[in-house]
Image (cartoon, rainbow, N blue to C red):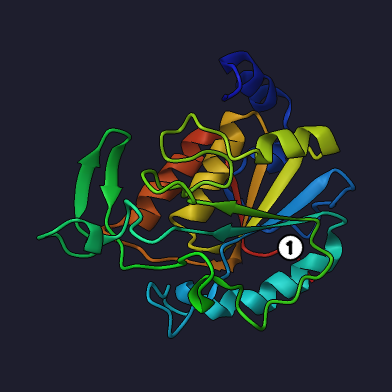
C-alpha cells in the first residue's frame, strides 16, 4: 500500500533544492548506485505501426540508450493484456476507442486492442537493447483492471510488486523514460512519490499521446507531487 503522509512529508523536507524544482537541466545531478532507470512500455504496439502508436514513439530509444550506461540498475515494464481486456473498446458494444467509461475502479479510457499477451505487438521494440536490465515487470494482466503505473494497478491500491522490489534491493530514487509521457510514465512517477520515493522523468526519453490536454494536466500534478522533470541527463 502507499506510504503515509509523514513519509512523503519527510522527502519533501529533506530533498535537495535541485530535486524539488519541476523542470531543469541536470548536468550536475550525480547518478548513484541506489538509483534505478525504469524504462516504461517501449513496445511495438506503442511505436509507429502499432495498434496504439504514440506519435514518434520510437524516438525514445536513442535517448534511453544514452542514459542507460549511467545506471547500475535498470528495470523494464511491459504492458501485458489478456484478450478481451477491460480497457479494449471492442469489449464494450457501442463504444469506440478513446471514449471514457466508468468502472468500479473509476474512469477508464477505452483503447484499441494492444499489447495482447504473446503477440508481436506486446514485444519490446526490436531496436531497444538493454540486456543489462535486471527485471521485466509485466502489468495490466488482470482482465478486469488496467494498470498504467509500474507501481499500482488502476484501483490505486493493488501493488504490482515494484515497490517491494526497490525496497529489498535498496533502490531509493527512480528515473523514468518511455511511453507514454502523460500516461504510464506519468502515473508511475506519481505513484513513486506516493511511496515517498524521489522520481525524475527524463523528458527527451519520453513521447506523449496528449489526449484532451493530458500533458498539461499531468505536469500540473507533477508540480503538486514533487516529481522532477529534466530535459536530459547531460552529455
Residue at figure coordinates x 55%, y 37% from the top left: 191
**In front here: 199 or 164?**
164
In this orientation, does residue 13 appear? yes
Q: In this view, does 117 lie to the left or right of 55?
A: right
Residue at figure coordinates x 51%, y 32% from the top left: 158
Percent of width and height locating residue 148: 46, 50
Percent of width and height locating residue 181: 49, 60
Q: Is residue 11 left or right of residue 34?
A: left
Residue at figure coordinates x 81%, y 56% from the top left: 134
Residue 47, compared with residue 3, is above or below; it is below
**In front here: 60 or 140?**
140
In this orientation, does residue 198 appear? no
Residue 212, compared with residue 217, is above or below; it is below
Image quarter (top left, top right, bottom left or bottom right) of the C terminus: bottom right
Residue 123, compared with residue 225, is above or below; it is below
Q: Is residue 49 left or right of residue 174?
A: left
Q: Mark 1 points at which residue?
A: 233
Q: Which residue lies furthest to the left in this view?
A: 94
Percent of width and height locating residue 137: 65, 52
Question: In which quarter of the view is residue 84 placed?
Answer: bottom left
Question: In which quarter of the view is residue 231 placed?
Answer: bottom right
Residue at figure coordinates x 43%, y 79% from the top left: 50
| Label 1 neighbour load within 10 Å: few <14, some 14-19, many 20+ | many
Percent of width and height locating residue 209: 38, 66
Amino acid at each position: 500500500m502507499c506510504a503515509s503522509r509523514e513519509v512523503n512529508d519527510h522527502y519533501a523536507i529533506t530533498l535537495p533544492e535541485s530535486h524539488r524544482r519541476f523542470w531543469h537541466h541536470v548536468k550536475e545531478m550525480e547518478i548513484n548506485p541506489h538509483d534505478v532507470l525504469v524504462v516504461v512500455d517501449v513496445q511495438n504496439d506503442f511505436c509507429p505501426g502499432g495498434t496504439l502508436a504514440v506519435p514518434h514513439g520510437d524516438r525514445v530509444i536513442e535517448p534511453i540508450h544514452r542514459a542507460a550506461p549511467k545506471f547500475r540498475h535498470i528495470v523494464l515494464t511491459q504492458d501485458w493484456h489478456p484478450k478481451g481486456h477491460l480497457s479494449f473498446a471492442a469489449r464494450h458494444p457501442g463504444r469506440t476507442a478513446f471514449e471514457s467509461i466508468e468502472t468500479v475502479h473509476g474512469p477508464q479510457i477505452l483503447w484499441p486492442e494492444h499489447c495482447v499477451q504473446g503477440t508481436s505487438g506486446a514485444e519490446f521494440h526490436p531496436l531497444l537493447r538493454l540486456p543489462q536490465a535486471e527485471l521485466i515487470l509485466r502489468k495490466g494482466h488482470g482482465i478486469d483492471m488496467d494498470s498504467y503505473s509500474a507501481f499500482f494497478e488502476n484501483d490505486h491500491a493493488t501493488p504490482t510488486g515494484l515497490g517491494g522490489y526497490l525496497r529489498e534491493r535498496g533502490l531509493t530514487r527512480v528515473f523514468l523514460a518511455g511511453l507514454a509521457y502523460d500516461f504510464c510514465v506519468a502515473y508511475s512517477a506519481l505513484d513513486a512519490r506516493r511511496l515517498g520515493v524521489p522520481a525524475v522523468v527524463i523528458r527527451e526519453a519520453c513521447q506523449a499521446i496528449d489526449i484532451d490536454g493530458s500533458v498539461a494536466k499531468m505536469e500540473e500534478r507533477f508540480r503538486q507531487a514533487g516529481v522532477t522533470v529534466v530535459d536530459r541527463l547531460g552529455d
